Image: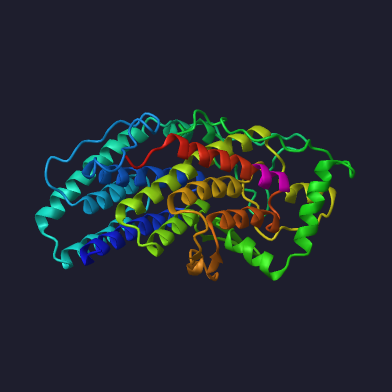
């Protein structure tokens, strides 16, 4: 692999990391973050494929309503064009534009310092912007804008239904996300999971026993279980409360964590920019449709969180290790998206690839070693029980739901010709 090729791959990963950094700064919710990642990486992938039409398959006709992008009319550098497509698409979907522009400028300055010709940069970046505009036009048809104008969600005050939780009692996150156009699923409800246990407060009922299980696990956590819960917390906005002072701590989203894993394994396996882009793109598609499917179930079943139930019926002083996210409990988002992504990454990189995950190091947590994507997904799933924010059925049925989504992504999408 030439030095210039390796430099371009590094710059591509840097562009993805820039997008992640701004998503964290802007505190985008996990579903919204997945949307940004998906469109930005589809733009990059389609740009690369347009320059290599004989080896890889465009996603046009494979993703819902996506049409072929414009073809390059000049000789271009595909890597430069793909980076521009990713950055242009991402910039349109975030808020911290100045931060984004300053960091983007550093990436492009590195190309100048490496001796890339002004003409190559100009023509390649111009083509990347063309593809980005094509993708951005496609985004306008996914119903996202309409969901921004919908009425504020009012919690249903009936026994067993979700209610806002401490410490912030925040409003429900994305209650209308099932109205967003999926990329490969036929509908938001295609992979609908088995129902949760019926709500009951009777001590001998299955639901009470599920809550009791969460309570008991939370009281007997080992140091390793505590570390696992915190490692996979991925709460974009942790609310700190000290007396009358409230302030937020920004963190990576669950989707951002899995895309980080995709990038780390791509680098570990010396994947070229085409393989890296495909890994990011498949991961982002699984995340995007995974959140749509999961959120569809969350607001249909509308299950009460363990914290609310346990405080009312078992132990009024109990608090979960992690802050309870502001949306209904069933199914577990981590379980759904982690299982879906593990399926596609296993397909793309192979089974039993061991990797060191350093995603959470910037947030004060150590690296963790995994023997496979499946093992990482299983740990991410059970972390929600350790954190005290999910009952077991949400985890176990969420894993099955995610498995179905991942398999469907692979069934619907062909990358190589």
State the extent of the magenta-drawn residues as a range: 392-397
Which x, y percent locates residue 5? 24, 61
Residue 395 within the segment the image draws in magenta? yes
Image spot of residue 178 (x, y percent):
53, 33
Q: Is residue 137 above or below residue 230?
A: above
Vertical relation: 382 (above or below) 150: below
Name the quarter where the N terminus is drawn: bottom left
Residue depicted at x 68% and y 58%:
387
User: Where, by quadrant of the figure, is residue 25 drawn?
Assistant: bottom left
Main secondary structure along the magenta-highlighted residues = helix
Residue 412, magenta (yes or no)? no
Visible in this render: residue 289? yes
State left or right for residue 123 relative to residue 217. left
- Residue at 22% across / 60% down in the picture? 108
**Could you say which is closer to the camera, residue 175 or residue 54?**
54
| Relative vertical location of residue 50 with respect to residue 97 in this rendering, above or below | above
Determine the residue positioned at 48% across, 46% down.
Answer: 344
* Residue 179 image position (x, y, % from top left): 51, 30
Give x and y (percent) for residue 332: 63, 46
As displayed, is residue 95 above or below residue 249? above
What residue is drawn where x is 12% and y is 47%?
75
Left or right of 358, for residue 6: left
Q: Quadrant of the C terminus?
A: top left
């Amino acid at each position: 692999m030439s030095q210039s090729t390796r430099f371009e791959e590094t710059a591509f990963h840097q562009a993805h990391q820039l997008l992640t950094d701004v998503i964290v700064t802007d505190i985008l919710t996990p579903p919204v973050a997945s949307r940004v990642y998906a469109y930005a990486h589809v733009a990059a992938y389609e740009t690369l494929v347009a320059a290599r039409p004989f080896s890889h398959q465009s996603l046009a006709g494979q993703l819902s309503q996506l049409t072929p992008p414009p073809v390059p009319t000049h000789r271009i550098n595909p890597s430069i064009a793909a980076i521009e497509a990713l950055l242009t698409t991402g910039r349109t979907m975030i808020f911290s534009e100045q931060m984004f522009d300053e960091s983007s400028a550093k990436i492009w300055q590195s190309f100048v310092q490496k001796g890339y010709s002004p003409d190559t940069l100009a023509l390649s970046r111009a083509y990347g912007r063309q593809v980005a505009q094509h993708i951005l036009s496609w985004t306008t048809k996914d119903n996202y804008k309409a969901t921004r104008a919908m009425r504020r969600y009012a919690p249903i005050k009936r026994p067993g239904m979700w209610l806002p939780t401490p410490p912030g009692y925040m409003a429900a996150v994305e209650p209308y996300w099932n109205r967003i156009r999926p990329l490969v699923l036929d509908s938001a409800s295609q992979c609908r999971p088995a129902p949760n246990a019926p709500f009951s407060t009777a001590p001998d009922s299955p639901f009470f026993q599920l809550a009791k299980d969460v309570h008991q696990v939370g009281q007997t956590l080992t140091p390793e279980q505590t570390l696992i819960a915190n490692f996979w917390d991925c709460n974009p906005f942790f609310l700190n409360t000290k007396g009358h002072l409230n302030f937020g701590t920004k963190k990576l989203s669950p989707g951002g964590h899995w895309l980080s894993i995709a990038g780390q394994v791509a680098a570990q396996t010396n994947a070229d920019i085409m393989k890296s882009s495909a890994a990011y793109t498949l991961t982002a598609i699984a995340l995007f449709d995974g959140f749509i499917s999961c959120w569809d179930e969350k607001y249909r079943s509308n299950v009460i969180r363990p914290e609310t139930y346990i405080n009312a019926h078992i132990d009024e002083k109990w608090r979960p290790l992690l802050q309870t996210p502001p949306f209904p409990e069933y199914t577990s988002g981590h379980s759904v998206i982690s299982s879906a992504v593990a399926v596609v990454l296993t397909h793309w990189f192979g089974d039993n690839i061991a990797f060191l995950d350093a995603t959470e190091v910037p947030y004060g947590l150590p690296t963790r070693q995994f023997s496979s994507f499946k093992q990482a997904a299983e740990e991410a799933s059970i972390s929600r029980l350790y954190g005290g924010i999910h009952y077991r059925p949400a985890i176990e049925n969420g894993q099955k739901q995610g498995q179905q989504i991942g398999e469907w992504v692979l069934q619907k999408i062909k990358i190589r010709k």
